Amino acid sequence: MPGRAPPFIASTGKYAARVQFGRYFEEFEVGAVYRHWPGKTVTESDDHLFCLITMNHHPLHLNDVYAKQSQQGRNVVVGPLVYSLALGMSVSDVSGKAIANLATEELSHPAPVFHGDTLFCESEVLEVKESKSKPDRGTVRVHTRVLNQDGVLVAEFKRLVLVPRKQPA
């Protein structure tokens, strides 16, 4: 139709994106799995910039000569960057309408991430709980898994998000 933004394409001006961003409390269901899109290839620049911004100067992340002598034999992407990317990838499905992120739990990095690896994430809804004190909200607990391009689990964590209800109870 002339004059309309194409579906699923975010645009500026008078046309709004048709892509859902976040969910209301009622839209979460225990057992649902959200596969977050798009994936992200982690570059050396991404890793170095994140390390420098966060003042993490460990040579395993920044120094090729040092990293070649390490157990991995090459630079390893700093773990908090992997977590931050996964958290960011999950926002449009999990916390895009959040009132607050309440907790991150059980963060682990079972395998390293290297420059050039592409990360993919999915989140499973573990718990949906109505607020006892405020009927306009509730909490959602999710388990997010981060896989590299070979399907290897490189990080995982659980988080608790406070989300609004579409219709207060």
Image (tube, rainbow, N blue to C red):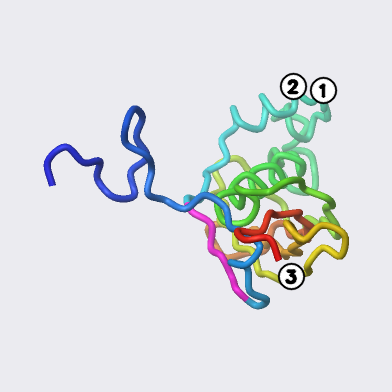
Query: Disc 2, disc 1: CB below 8 Å?
Result: yes
- The residue lying toward the viewer, choosing from 7 and 130, is 130
Can you give x and y, in whole percent of width and height, for residue 51 in the image? 74, 28
Query: Residue 128: which quarter of the image?
Result: bottom right
Amino acid at dot 3: Val
Left or right relative to 3: residue 163: right
The residue drawn where x is 73% and y is 57% is 136
Query: Distance from label 2 to label 1 (Cα)?
Result: 5 Å
Q: Is residue 34 magenta?
A: yes
Q: Which mark is residue 55?
A: 1
Q: Secondary structure at mark 3?
A: strand
Q: Which mark is residue 155?
A: none
Point out the stretch of residues depicted in magenta.
Answer: 32-37
Query: Distance from label 1 to label 3 (Cα)?
Result: 37 Å
Query: Distance from label 2 to label 3 (Cα)?
Result: 38 Å
Amino acid at dot 1: Met
Mark sitting earlier along the chain (2/3): 2
Q: Is residue 29 magenta?
A: no
The residue drawn where x is 66% and y is 59% is 165
The quadrant in which the C terminus is found is bottom right
Q: Which mark is residue 128?
A: 3
Mark sitting earlier along the chain (1/3): 1
Q: Is residue 38 above or below residue 142?
A: above
The residue drawn where x is 60% and y is 74% is 32
Name the residue beneath numbered marker 2.
52
Q: Is residue 14 visible?
A: yes
Q: Is residue 147 visible?
A: no
